Amino acid sequence: MHFSFWYLYLGGWSDGTSDRCTSLLKRVCLWLLVFSMTGPAYGWNKPTHMAIGAIAYRDLQAKSPRKLARVVEILRQHPDVKTRWATMLRDSSLTDDEKNRYLFMLAARWPDDIRGQNNPNDHASWHFINYVYNPGLGIARTDSTLATSENILQAFEQNRKILTSDAPDSTKAFALCWLFHLAGDVHMPLHTAALISPQFPEGDKGGNLFKIKMAMSNPTLNLHSFWDGMLLGKDAFRAADQLAISLSQTHTRRELPRPRKPAITDWSKESFALARTIAYQQGQLKGGTGNEGVVLPEGYVDTVKPIAEQQAAWAGHRLAVELLTDVKKR
């Protein structure tokens, strides 16, 4: 329903009315088209996680085809290969290499696919960490967090241990999916911050309670959803793969900050800094609550989108380094 509405609205620009729409309003409608195709706010949306998986695949392919083959071998032991993913992986239009890359992409989104389905492998608290950010009091701390169950840092290390252990491949397949996904989530700035203020005394849940609008006449959405769907709204293989190619060309492995070894705690602190300075604009970004969002300031989209692109690319590159480090050859 939402998709059709925005499609018709955008289509109206082709009949001569485009000169009456500012470039800002065009961007607003395009953003809302993307958001209307995404689900609940989980972090990067599924298409972006898929792109991150594809970036890691190509990096691993270039660095160590043998380790790539081993990762594919492990992932083939995931039960969804024969169920949820079966039709997609049998697509006759895909080459064998593309099918293996698609497997990486599906693995990267899998932890979101199973959310809310009473799946024993679903762990809601694993997707984030709540570093405390209270700009009103000048507090921005990475040595303390709001209380949750196991957080993303703990979950990442837990699954690394499984991957490097003598566990059967069927067990390692689940661990790989989580590592793929968490490497993406930790690079999403709003997965590392809890904004605390008089408006959000118990935290804004990574922007999920922080309500915004693209323009006064537009529907309210939350800041997390805005970041979540910023890069792509279509979860088809070709679209996500093309995004991966574009991100890798714009942000290459060589630009990664040193040290380049796996260090998820450092990645989380980088993201927290971006949450403060970019996402929340040093505490100056105004948000609403309930059903009434505050309009984003002019230029916000143009400022934050390159950061989102950088973070998604770095997530893919760093995931590849993680796999090179942790996966044992046969």
Image (tube, rainbow, N blue to C red):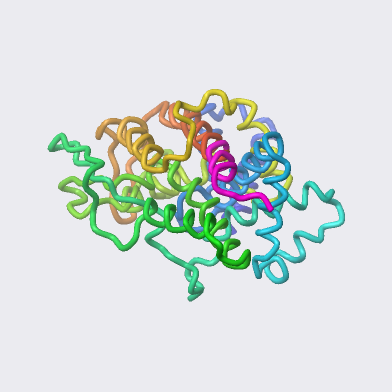
Q: Residue at x 32, y 30 (%)?
A: 277
Q: Residue furthest right?
A: 92
Tell me if 256 is positioned left or right of 107 in this view: left
Tell me if 4 is positioned left or right of 145 in this view: right
From the viewer's perspective, is residue 193 above or below residue 157? above
Quadrant of residue 323 within the rendered picture: top right
Question: Over which residues does the magenta segment extend?
Answer: 317-330
- Magenta segment: does it hold 329? yes
Main SS of the magenta part reads helix
**Where's residue 183, x and y in %?**
49, 46
Q: Looking at this view, is 86 or 259 the one in front?
A: 259
Q: Residue at x 59, y 42 (%)?
A: 324
Q: Residue at x 60, y 44 (%)?
A: 9
**Where's residue 289, x and y in %?**
28, 52
- Magenta segment: does it hold 191? no
Q: Looking at this view, is 322 or 303 the one in front?
A: 322
Residue 112 appearing in the image: no
**Where's residue 220, x and y in %?**
40, 49
From the viewer's perspective, is residue 244 above or below residue 86? above
Image quadrant containing the N terminus: bottom right
Residue 170 appearing in the image: yes
Q: Looking at this view, is 218 or 31 the one in front?
A: 31
Quadrant of residue 231 within the rendered picture: top right
**Where's residue 320, x and y in %?**
59, 41
